[in-house]
Amino acid sequence: MLLITLISATLAVAQPAPVLDAAATLAAPGEARRLVLDGRSWVCGPDGVCVARGSGASQPLLRECRRFVARFGAVTRYERGGAALGEAELAQCNAAAA
């Protein structure tokens, strides 16, 4: 019994936490939404926090942000794979919301 408990505990600890492929924060939160965009499955909560899973299409981060903003609206944060857009890039990205 002890051996089974130890194995179960080891397996529970050994599993890595799920990794998000991209994330964004909407400037104007609204209702929860889901959408598959360019190969990523996006989920946005009513608080405006959006997370995505999936490898997505190979494209520059700013272009990807513009495509996201065209569907979801302006953002205050956009990142993918640990790289985040700066303030000037976010302003360029949000121009796609108009």
Image (spheres, rainbow, N blue to C red):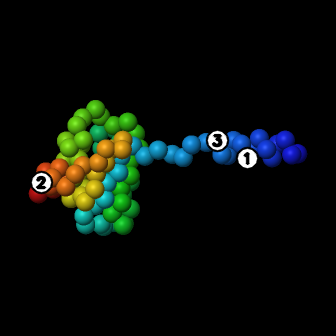
Q: Is residue 16 left or right of residue 70?
A: right
Distance between the alpha carbons at the discs numbered 2 and 1: 50 Å
Q: Is residue 10 left or right of residue 47?
A: right
Q: Which residue is mark 3?
A: 14
- Quarter occupied by the C terminus: bottom left
Q: Amino acid at mark 1?
A: Ala
Residue drawn where x is 75% and y is 44% of the image: 8
Mark 2 or mark 1, whichever is nearer to me: 1
| Earlier-in-chain disc, 1 versus 3 | 1
Residue drawn where x is 28% and y is 56% of the image: 77
Q: Residues within 10 Å of mark 2 (few under 14, many from 20)?
A: few
Q: Residues within 10 Å of mark 3 (few under 14, many from 20)?
A: few
Mark 2 or mark 3, whichever is nearer to me: 3
Q: Residue 12, how many percent across, how many down?
A: 67, 46
Q: Which residue is mark 2?
A: 95
Secondary structure of the residue carrying tag 3 is: helix
Q: Which residue is mark 1?
A: 9
Question: Is residue 34 something that shows in the picture?
Answer: no
Q: Amino acid at mark 3?
A: Ala
Q: Residue 51, how many percent across, how many down?
A: 38, 52
Residue drawn where x is 31% and y is 54% of the image: 24
Q: Is residue 10 left or right of residue 70?
A: right
Q: Amino acid at mark 2?
A: Ala
Secondary structure of the residue carrying tag 1 is: helix
Secondary structure of the residue carrying tag 2 is: helix
Q: Residue 21, how many percent across, how many down?
A: 39, 43
Q: Is residue 70 above or below residue 31?
A: above
Q: Identify the mark at residue 42; answer none if there is no mark.
A: none
